[in-house]
Image: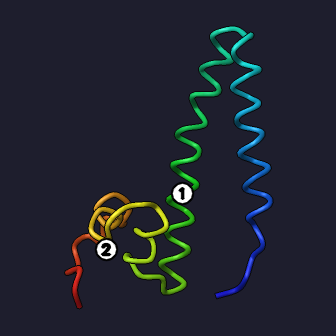
Amino acid sequence: MRKVETLEWLKMLSRMIRAAGRRVADADEHELSQLAQLRDDLESAIKVAIQGQRAAGRSWAHIGLALGLSRQGAFQRYALEREQKKPLFG
């Protein structure tokens, strides 16, 4: 697996999202809607990241641990439909 330094970048992104919440607190409702859309964007980004982790050979146990889920919980939530049709063991 190639090493990509992303921790500082993710910390910066987290600060930006928190700042966006503060800015939207004084904004109009359409801006609140845009902020809420970030939930879907983040969930999509997580799914892409998990697909990449799986393609690189990461186990569901490792992914679950990173997400604070059990192996089975991570699999049930994030496995692609074609992967869910395969047995989990084997």
Along the viewing direction, whichever of 15 and 89 lies nearer the viewer: 15
Q: Are marks 1 and 2 in contact (CB under 8 Å)?
A: no
Q: Is residue 13 above or below residue 65?
A: above
Q: Quadrant of residue 89?
A: bottom left
Residue 3 placement, left or right of 67: right
Q: Which residue matches tag 2?
A: 83
Identify the residue at horizontal 46%, vertical 61% (top origin). Answer: 67
Could you tell me how many numbered marks the image carries? 2
Give the position of the C terminus as an image quadrant. Answer: bottom left
Q: Quadrant of residue 21?
A: top right
Along the viewing direction, whichever of 77 and 18 lies nearer the viewer: 18
Q: Is residue 16 above or below residue 46?
A: above
Along the viewing direction, whichever of 45 and 23 lies nearer the viewer: 23
Q: Position of residue 34 (x, y in %)?
A: 64, 25
User: Label 1 amino acid?
Assistant: Ile
Q: Of the residues tagged 1 and 2, which is closer to the observer?
A: 1
Q: Position of residue 50 (x, y in %)?
A: 50, 67
Q: Secondary structure at mark 2?
A: helix
Q: How is the image coloured?
A: rainbow
Q: Is residue 62 above or below residue 57?
A: above
The numbered dot on residue 46 is 1
Identify the residue at horizontal 79%, vertical 58% (top origin). Answer: 9
Q: Residues within 10 Å of mark 2 (few under 14, many from 20)?
A: few
User: Label 2 amino acid?
Assistant: Glu
* Residue farthest to the bottom, as pictured: 90
Identify the residue at horizontal 32%, vertical 66% (top origin). Answer: 70
Q: Residues within 10 Å of mark 1 (few under 14, many from 20)?
A: some
Give the position of the N terminus as an image quadrant. Answer: bottom right
Q: Position of residue 88 (x, y in %)?
A: 23, 80
The numbered dot on residue 88 is none
